Image (spheres, rainbow, N blue to C red):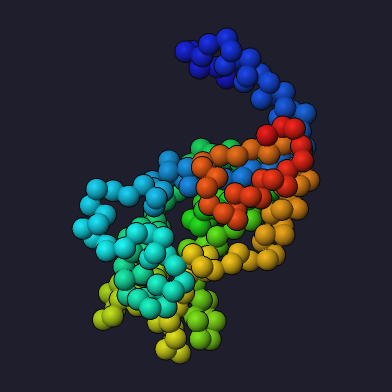
Amino acid sequence: IYNKNMNEESKEKLKLLQKIYDESSNIVFFGGAGVSTESGIPDFRSIDGLYYQQWKYPPETILSHSFFEENAQEFYRFYRKKMIYPEAKPNTTHKILSQMEAKGKLKAIVTQNIDGLHQKAGSKNVFELHGSVLRNYCTKCHKFYSEKKIIESENEENGLPLCDCGGLIKPDVVLYEEGLDDFVVESAIKAISKADVLIIGGTSLVVYPAASFIDYYHGKKL
């Protein structure tokens, strides 16, 4: 489908993209924060003008393992404000990727996002490199909690989500200073290395080690 303002060069590129898609049977999508901005989830790296009036630290500091351990209250104040968007819904990109998977074209999604919108759109084979806000576990007994528990804990006296056993609940997201899950990493690299087409979207490829995974792509249709 051509945009009425599209020039001939763009039309030819679109034809080529369609040809690549038609001839491919093992497409992998590698995505980042830009995929979800249309759903109303901003990239936290885009710091708004009021940022430093609300928080004394940059996001990379707050979202670190050591900060979580030393200042959980401030961590959760930021986390609930900037990282959880329970009303967000899948957008066009999420839906199209789900359709591509249903048609047998797309074999895997490797995402740096933690919002779970790919799964909400219907995608099944999703490798979440940085975890998910939808999963939360007690650091003491490992009991599972949904994001609802994190949201509601704002009304608690200390603003902390505590387990029934008294332990502090932690989001199943990879914080700075923490390593990625080995199984997820191995699965993502395997999918990328076998892809005949690799599509990259919504990421500046500056977050490592995730960005380095595209080096495992051996094809010529990037």
Q: Looking at the rendering, which quadrant does residue 61 occupy? A: bottom left
Q: Find residue 5 and report its horizontal and vertical position in percent.
A: 47, 13
Of the 4 image quadrants, the one containing the N terminus is top right
Q: Compared to 16, does 21 lie above or below? A: below
Q: Find residue 74 and report its horizontal and vertical position in percent.
A: 31, 71
Q: Compared to 92, does 68 lie above or below? A: below
Residue at the spot x=28%, y=80% of the render?
158
Residue at the spot x=53%, y=11% of the render?
7
Q: Indicate left or right for 159 with 101 as reference.
A: left
Of the 4 image quadrants, the one containing the C terminus is top right
Q: Find residue 162 and report its horizontal and vertical position in percent.
A: 40, 82
Name the residue nearer the viewer: 38 or 119: 38
Q: Indicate left or right for 211 with 53 as reference.
A: right
Residue at the spot x=66%, y=18% of the render?
15
Name the residue nearer the viewer: 180 or 156: 180
Residue 102, visible in the rendered structure = no
